[in-house]
Amino acid sequence: MTEKKYPHHKVTGPDGAEFVVTPMEDYYCQERPQVQKSSNAVIEKFYNWARANSLWIVGFGTGCGAIEMRPLRTPRFDAYRYGVNWRATPRQSNLFIISGYLSVKTLKRVIRVYEQMQSPKYVLGLGSCTINGGMYWDSYNTIKRLDHYIPVDAYIPGCMPRPEALLDGFEELKKIIIAGEANGANLYAENFDWYKANQKKIIKNWDMPDYSW
Amino acid sequence: MKTLLTNLKKRHDITASKLQRNNELFVTVPNNQAVSLVTYLRDHEGFSHLVILSAVDWLEEEVFQLTYLLNNPELKQDIGVRTLVDRNEPVMESIHHLWEHSATYQRELFEMFGISFPTSPRMEEPFILEGWDGPPPYRRDFDTLKYAEETYFPRPGRTTNDVAAYMKEKLYPEDDND
């Protein structure tokens, strides 16, 4: 499947040298995710305090709940005073807010974005849809339980939750991080096969690498 | 619109018609005359804009009802051309040569209802549902609830309330059953 979508091609370098690029090997990492354990508990505690006060959110609104994040950036709610910031790329983010319902098509993108984020990374499920499907309980293409596809640290229930609820969710997440219980990335690495099996069960055209670092 | 209807009746076998509003008319024609009627309306009656091409699944009658909704921007009139397609062999003539954007509607109808429009561009490519391998989901005999429960790991403990009974209990708990 991948061979067709990502064919080998020749690239000419700036010095005129030609080399063959195999996208699946050269652009993607074949390694599985690794569990990262800190050797020093005290330093880890300090790190967690620092991480909790610097939540950078990947700018990817997956559903209708993304609209609740906009008011947070305005002077009225001013989420920036809590150390919350929005970034344009997963490489610079450590918090992924799944904002509402997730169709299978979006889930595929969500998985790619989640895997590209640096560890440690956290996930907030926003709205009822991420918990049990919410109002899309009988939909043919909306997932019901987000925690079967990627690890979730905290949920914010509601349909839709107000921006204040999101701020409360940030505070809860900070407590979880400071307590050292936000191990989503490690959980993902430990139960990698289970997560992949669940993901592949519903994403039928799996035309992407197993792990996109 | 009434003169238009009498005019159309001379040219095509209009099996049913309904004047929904003063500027909105729905006509039903046999399957093989739909495209010629739509072409006539576009070229001679000023209905130059295709608003939507949609389908209804009449499961009991075993037909799909297609509606071509056309708009006349100068007279501000709408006309809906309805036609029935056999549900067991859902093939319909394409109108992408009249309006290019109808190809998108036709792709959607193929994916959601399984109605095929041969010669329509990019017909077989996945459109909204990536990698879908089940039956077309908008068909009424497709059980979405059953599919969702089998596929998407329902969370145990979810309950559903009857809205009327629940609100009555919440708002007027002292009232007994009448």
Image (cartoon, rainbow, N blue to C red):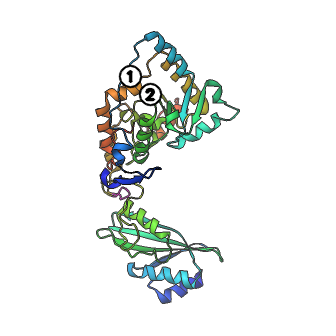
Residue type, mark 2 in image: Ser
Residue B22 visible? The answer is no
The residue lying toward the viewer, choosing from B118 and A53, is: A53
Residue B94 visible? The answer is yes
Q: Residue at x 42, y 82 (%)?
A: B33
Relative image position of residue A37 (x, y in whole percent): 38, 19
Residue B17 is covered by the magenta coloring: no
Relative image position of residue A113 (x, y in whole percent): 45, 39
Q: Residue furthest bottom?
A: B10
Relative image position of residue A129 (x, y in whole percent): 45, 38
Q: Residues within 10 Å of mark 1 (few under 14, many from 20)?
A: few
Q: Residue at x 57, y 30 (%)?
A: A166
The residue lying toward the viewer, choosing from B120 and B56, is: B120
In the rendered image, the vertical position of residue B124 relative to residue A107, given as above or below: below
Q: Say which chain tag 1 marks.
A: A
In the displayed structure image, the side of residue B145 where residue B12 appears, left or right: right
The residue lying toward the viewer, choosing from B139 and A212, is: A212
Q: Which secondary structure class fits the magenta region best?
A: loop
Q: Say what secondary structure mark 1 lies in.
A: loop
In the picture, the disc for residue A119 is 2
In the rendered image, the vertical position of residue B149 relative to residue B136, given as above or below: above
Q: Residue furthest right?
A: A75
Check disc 1 and report the residue beneath it. Answer: A36
Q: Say what secondary structure mark 2 lies in.
A: loop
Residue type, mark 1 in image: Gln
Boundaries of the magenta span? B136-140
* Circles 2 and 1: CB atoms closer than 8 Å: yes
Residue A75 falls in image quadrant:
top right
Q: Residue at x 47, y 10 (%)?
A: A42
